[in-house]
Amino acid sequence: MTAASVWGFLAACGLNPFDVVLVSPIYGYVDGCTEVAVTGRGFSEDVRARLGLQPALGAVLPAPGALERGFRFDILTPPNGNVGPVDLTVIDGEHIQTLSEAFHYVPCPAAFTVDGLSAYDAPANTRVSIYGCSLSTADVVVHLTNEDPAVPPVDLVPSPVCGTATIDFGVPNLPGTWTLTLQNRDGDPIWPAPCVEITTDSGTNCDVPLPLRIVAATETTP
């Protein structure tokens, strides 16, 4: 059954063929660039959305023929100067629907907050994104330290990808196991920030460097 036939069936039964049901996740940093899935039914290639008064950064539907096509699309949240909930409004042709306080903007906990990488096993000569908030590329280098102390560290210049929420860097052709930190150009640590560690049953209060395994460009990652 095609999406069009589903909409026709719903209309014949007196049900609204267009409906916005859910967003996930429901929160993200004020920096924006959080990937949010909007689910419901009746979404066409013309669908677009806004959060509060700001248009979302694009609206991407699943590939043609995918089962979710027409029932889901993905957006990136725009940055927002205010912390708190905002409405999600979806516009698709003549259809307009708003979910009240559907998404919540939360503050960035600290400058240069790093949440993770787009890949922890990365082929050489590709690019890896760093996700977080309050990220800048000014006077910043990605500092890689090899597990073998005899191998010299590597400094890489990152590039902005999406506002202050995502930066990326080119993976050097240096296969091996590395740890990733951020430094300024003078070699002073930026992330993880210096921290007095307190270990509890739930873990540590301090950020730790991220692992990165670089594989040869012809090698297959597991």
Image: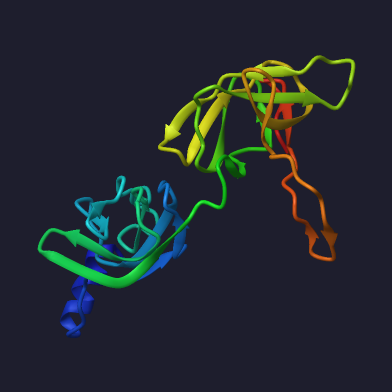
Q: Is residue 58 left or right of residue 12?
A: right
Whole-percent x, y for residue 85 in the image:
36, 67
Most foreground residue, 73 or 75:
75
How many marks overall? Answer: 0
Q: Is residue 122 left or right of residue 127?
A: right
- Residue 127 vs 172, above or below: the answer is below
Quarter that holds the N terminus: bottom left
Most foreground residue, 184 or 46:
184
Residue at the image point whose x is 55% and y is 42% from the top: 111
Most foreground residue, 40 or 34:
34
Residue 132 falls in image quadrant: top right
* Residue at the bottom extreme, as displayed: 14
Whole-percent x, y for residue 133 in the image:
51, 44
Q: In this view, does 13 lie to the left or right of 215?
A: left
User: Would you say residue 20 is visible in this rendering?
Assistant: no
Most foreground residue, 44 or 23:
23
Residue at the image point whose x is 73% and y is 40% from the top: 194
Whole-percent x, y for residue 171 in the image:
63, 22
